[in-house]
Amino acid sequence: MLCIRSLLWRKCRRDKTVDNRVAYAKQAENCKSLIFEYERSKELELIKRSNLGAFYRFVNKRLTAKSGVGPLRHAGSGDVIETDDSKKASMLNKYFGSVFVPGDGLLPEFSSRVSQDTFINSIEVTTGRVLCFINKSKTGSAPGPDGIPVFFLKQFKFSRSDTVSVEIS
């Protein structure tokens, strides 16, 4: 189908008759509808499989951009379009620097959400709560601010959970 369309396009470019243009337009429309039907069938097949991971992979492939920021047009100069990444970054920096101004240093007033006599006197941390939290943590997730990976905590949870609960309390 695509080969026939390409052949008709070359023929249409060489000999610009109405018949050649109509033949190319019909073939191009036929190719477009076949491609649409193929993609539609693939999407329906994906839905019927009920595989959430495959669905997210499919969607994410279509969401990712090939380049971060597209070409930018200079303000006021009309037809000048910038494609160089460093010049685009400079243009954006200059624009956002002009739009967002530094604050006056004054913080807005916020009303208190709790009564004035509410205090946290103590936090009860038990070995069971520490173990529960470690068990709920995902092994592949990023380490916390202490830099200790979750898989390490899970590996040694029984030998260290009582020490952690004592150190926090």
Image: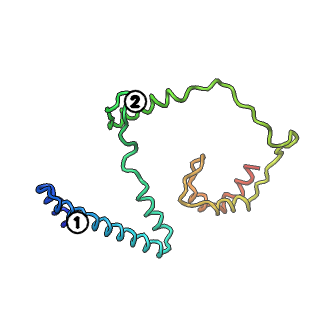
Question: Relative to 117, does residue 30 appear above or below in the rendering?
Answer: below
Q: Is residue 90 left or right of residue 14?
A: right
> Residue at position x 16%, y 61% from top?
20
- Determine which of the numbered discs, if any, sits on residue 75 in the image: 2
Rendering coords of residue 78 (x, y %): 34, 31
- Among all residues in the image, which is located at the extreme front? 18
Q: Quadrant of the N terminus?
A: bottom left
- Badge 1: residue crowd in 10 Å (few <14, some 14–19, many ≥20): few
What separation in Å lies between label 1 and label 2 (alpha carbons)? 41 Å
Type of the residue with mark 2: Ala
> Residue at position x 58%, y 57% from top?
150
Quadrant assignment, res 8: bottom left
Q: Is residue 69 left or right of residue 3?
A: right
Mark 2 residue element: loop
> Residue at position x 61%, y 58% from top?
153
Mark 1 residue element: helix
Q: Which residue is mark 1?
A: 2
Question: Relative to 103, does residue 156 appear above or below in the rendering?
Answer: below
Rendering coords of residue 117 (x, y %): 88, 41
Type of the residue with mark 1: Leu
Q: Are marks 1 and 2 in contact (CB under 8 Å)?
A: no
Question: Relative to 51, does residue 7 appear above or below in the rendering?
Answer: above
Q: Is residue 5 left or right of residue 67?
A: left
> Residue at position x 22%, y 66% from top?
2
Rendering coords of residue 109 (x, y %): 75, 32
